[in-house]
Image: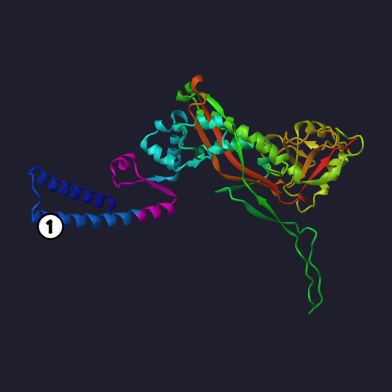
């Protein structure tokens, strides 16, 4: 017997029991002993079938989880209390969730269908009202949920990630570590490049060599995009891609501040920037306050242990690239080499002395004492992303202007794991 068969029998039993009770009520009497006995028998059958249905549905849910599918009650089933369930693929579930999220962006929670409200309820994220400015707290209403917002679904999150990566430079090169919550995480570090093995005589004991283990702690600093007002007309226009607009505006704002902190953060109340955590590889000669020479490039490159050089790259501001492009080696060969032409150009980037580079405008431009060039394995810098980005919809803050405001929150941290893996060039003080 299938789940559908059981549901059909349950429906038939329910109809018969309801009709029997209604007949007695219409005749203004109690059910007879025979009717009571028949009703009790049907009630027992109903409870037995219901237990069987629950077991079968639980088994089907487990099987669906193993196969990467999602089982969810359809709208009409939730509305009338039916036990029927719908089996969705993960892809279809994400598609419906993204549609619900877009509808919430356009029309608010009150504009969602019952099914969409149920799906969005799973994305509800509490926002501490005391952490918000007074004008934002006052602007919150039913459109934003009770003191909270909604974690963005996979599709919207993917767009945010693309814009975050497109801005800055750190996310392209660092190691990204997503976590399901924001609790502090101790991360072990080790640098064993100075140690080696030994030769020992037969039957001789071996020597001990301590390994210098360390630890950094990743926390979760809370970032805000600040409010982004969007006109009601744009939200109501079904032909306008409001998802992409919000993703770009919100991600670029968060991208700017986080990239700056991942680059030059002080490690006090904010992430530790890669420049802050790196160590000196080469100091410019007197007079090189806004310049460097070919030997500086070589010296900085070789200040990083060869163990870390595979996969290494350069990082600097665009104005520094302009200076480096003019450098030549002793044979007159340019240190900067453009990408290979033709079909290989998409796979082989521009290089400096054979290593790729990343433009990061948050690295200091060349000036007196500026740490203007970085080189090393940037996978030894870790960016921690805690949970998903949360979006809040504020319907009253700009209501008189015909606008709805959106506010994104995200939580991040960044730490360098090995100070010997990334070095910097520092311009001369004079």
Q: Position of residue 19 (x, y in %)?
A: 14, 46
Which residue is at the front of the view, 168 or 23? 23
Query: What segment carries the magenta color?
Result: 58-86
Residue 295 is left or right of residue 234, and the answer is right
Q: In the rendering, at what x and y percent does residue 149 appear?
A: 50, 37
* Left or right side of 244 for 420: right
Outermost residue, top side: 401
Q: Name the residue carrying label 1.
A: 37
Which of the pair 204/218 is nearer the observer? 218
User: Picture quarter containing residue 90?
Assistant: top left
Note whether residue 120 is visible.
Answer: yes
The residue shown at (59%, 31%) is: 226
Q: Secondary structure at mark 1?
A: helix
Mark 1: few, some, or many residues within 10 Å (few <14, many ≥20)?
A: few
Left or right: residue 122 compared with residue 316: left
Residue 369 image position (x, y, % from top left): 85, 37
């Amino acid at each position: 017997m299938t789940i559908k068969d059981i549901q059909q029998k349950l429906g038939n039993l329910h109809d018969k029991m309801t009709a029997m009770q209604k007949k007695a009520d219409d005749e203004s009497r109690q059910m007879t002993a025979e009717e009571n006995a028949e009703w009790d028998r049907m009630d027992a059958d109903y409870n037995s079938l219901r237990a069987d249905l629950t077991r079968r549905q639980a088994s089907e849910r487990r099987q669906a989880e193993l196969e990467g599918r999602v089982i969810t009650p359809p709208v009409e089933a939730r509305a009338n209390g039916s036990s029927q369930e719908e089996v969705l693929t993960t892809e279809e579930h994400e598609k419906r969730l993204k549609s619900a999220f877009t509808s919430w962006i356009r029309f608010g929670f009150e504009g969602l269908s019952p099914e969409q409200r149920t799906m969005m309820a799973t994305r509800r994220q509490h926002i501490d009202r005391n952490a918000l400015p007074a004008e934002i707290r006052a602007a919150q209403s039913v459109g934003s949920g009770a003191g909270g917002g909604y974690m963005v679904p996979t599709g919207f999150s993917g767009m945010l990630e693309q814009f975050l990566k497109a801005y800055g430079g750190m996310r392209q090169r660092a190691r990204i570590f997503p976590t399901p919550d924001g609790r502090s995480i101790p991360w072990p570090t080790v640098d064993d490049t100075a140690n080696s093995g030994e030769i020992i005589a037969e039957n001789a004991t071996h020597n001990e060599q301590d390994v210098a283990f360390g630890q950094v702690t990743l926390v979760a600093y809370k970032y805000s995009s600040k409010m982004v007002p969007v006109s009601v007309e744009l939200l109501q226009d079904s032909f306008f891609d409001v998802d992409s607009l919000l993703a770009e505006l919100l991600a670029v704002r968060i991208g700017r501040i986080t990239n700056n902190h991942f680059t030059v953060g002080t490690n006090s109340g904010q992430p530790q920037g890669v420049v802050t955590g790196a160590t000196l590889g080469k100091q410019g000669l007197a007079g090189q306050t806004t310049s460097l020479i070919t030997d500086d490039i070589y010296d900085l490159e070789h200040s990083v242990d060869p163990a870390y050089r595979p996969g290494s790259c350069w990082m600097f501001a665009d104005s520094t690239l302009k200076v480096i492009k003019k450098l030549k080696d002793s044979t007159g060969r340019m240190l900067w080499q453009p990408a290979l032409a033709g079909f290989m150009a998409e796979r082989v980037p521009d290089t400096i002395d054979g290593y790729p580079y990343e433009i990061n405008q948050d690295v200091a431009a060349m000036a007196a004492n500026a740490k203007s060039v970085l080189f090393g394995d940037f996978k030894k810098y870790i960016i921690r992303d805690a949970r998903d980005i949360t979006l809040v919809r504020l319907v009253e803050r700009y209501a008189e202007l015909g606008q709805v405001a959106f506010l994104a929150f995200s939580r991040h941290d960044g730490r360098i794991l090995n100070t010997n893996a990334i070095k910097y060039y520092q311009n001369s003080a004079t």
